[in-house]
Image (spheres, helix red, strand yellow):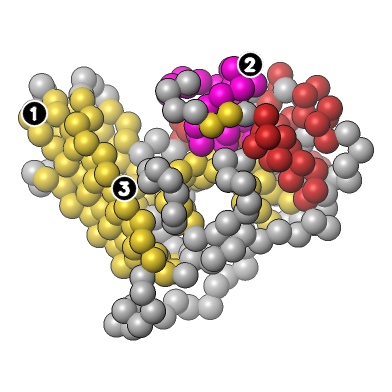
Amino acid sequence: MILDASCSLAYATKAEVPAIFMLRPRSGWAQWIMREEFMLSPHVPVVEYTDLYGNLCQRVVLPKGEFRFSMFCRASVPDHIDMLPTARRVPVAQLPVELLHYLLPSRYCQSDKLSRLAYSITGNVPRTYQQIARLRHWVHENIEYEYGTSNASTSALETVNTKRGVCRDFAHLGIALCRAVSVPARMVVGFLHELEPMDLHAWYEAYIGGRWFTFDATEDEPKGNRIVIAYGRDAADVAQATMYGAFQCTEMKVTVSAVREGSEKETPQPPDPAPPA
């Protein structure tokens, strides 16, 4: 499917505020960015760089007063999520070195404190994709999706105790449970078509059978039509905006829509996808 997505963030400040934005998606094996643009109002100098996880970042200094960051992209994405029940876990000793940090506890994913829970959930389930699918199902069935029950500092351990949260909390808990059974897991933020209410969305990926698979504990059924913006260990690595000073977010608007058949013809077609990394 071809999707158009946009995000507009407005801020008010009483002094200059250094900031880092992370809202520009990049092409990868599962998505191709056909068009992409962003706008700063008022215009300020921008330093663009790629972080440790390959995410595209924009470093700016917000001026005193009102400021808006807007982005738009058109992307070709799969309309389904790959599932492979027979995919086997990769033994820790055979994992690529660059993935080992996705096994470790992180700020919001205290996997070292959730091992007993994780193994009680999976029981005798084969050490394959099915084990991670069981963990996802447990989170979906046992955590209630409810706005206003968590905040930016809520961790996976707290979510287990309160049994409430939003997509970010569902993702953190799913990641922590995966790591607790020695499966690398990373957080993903981006756009999801037909999400209600519309907003940026968080989910996670687990490394099984030599590749990453998508899991979303928020949704009833696996669904595709996602545009990935950023990857990281947890929310600390994938914040849409990081501010180093006092500010007020005065508006946030997110849109995602399917491009009608034929209207994308003026855009070049994507190259053959590379194999998953």
Query: What SS does tag 1 mark?
Result: loop
Q: Earlier in the sequence, mark 2 or mark 1?
A: 1
Eye-nearest disc, 1 or 3 = 3
State the separation of the CA atoms marked 3 and 2.
31 Å
| Circle number at residue 64 | 1
Residue depicted at 51% across the width and 36% down the height = 167
Left or right? Give the position of 21 relative to 207.
left
Taking depth in this image into account, of 206 and 244 the one nearest to the observer is: 206
> Which range of residues does the magenta coloring cover?
150-174
Q: Earlier in the sequence, mark 1 or mark 3?
A: 1
Q: Quadrant of residue 86?
A: bottom right
Q: As shown in the figure, which amino acid type bears the numbered disc 1?
A: Lys
Left or right? Give the position of 30 relative to 183.
left
Query: What SS does tag 3 mark?
Result: strand
Specify whether residue 1 is in view.
Answer: yes
Q: Position of residue 244 (x, y in %)?
A: 27, 24
Q: Which residue is mark 3?
A: 254
Q: As shown in the figure, which amino acid type bears the numbered disc 3?
A: Val
Residue depicted at 89% across the width and 45% down the height = 126
Q: Which residue is mark 2?
A: 161
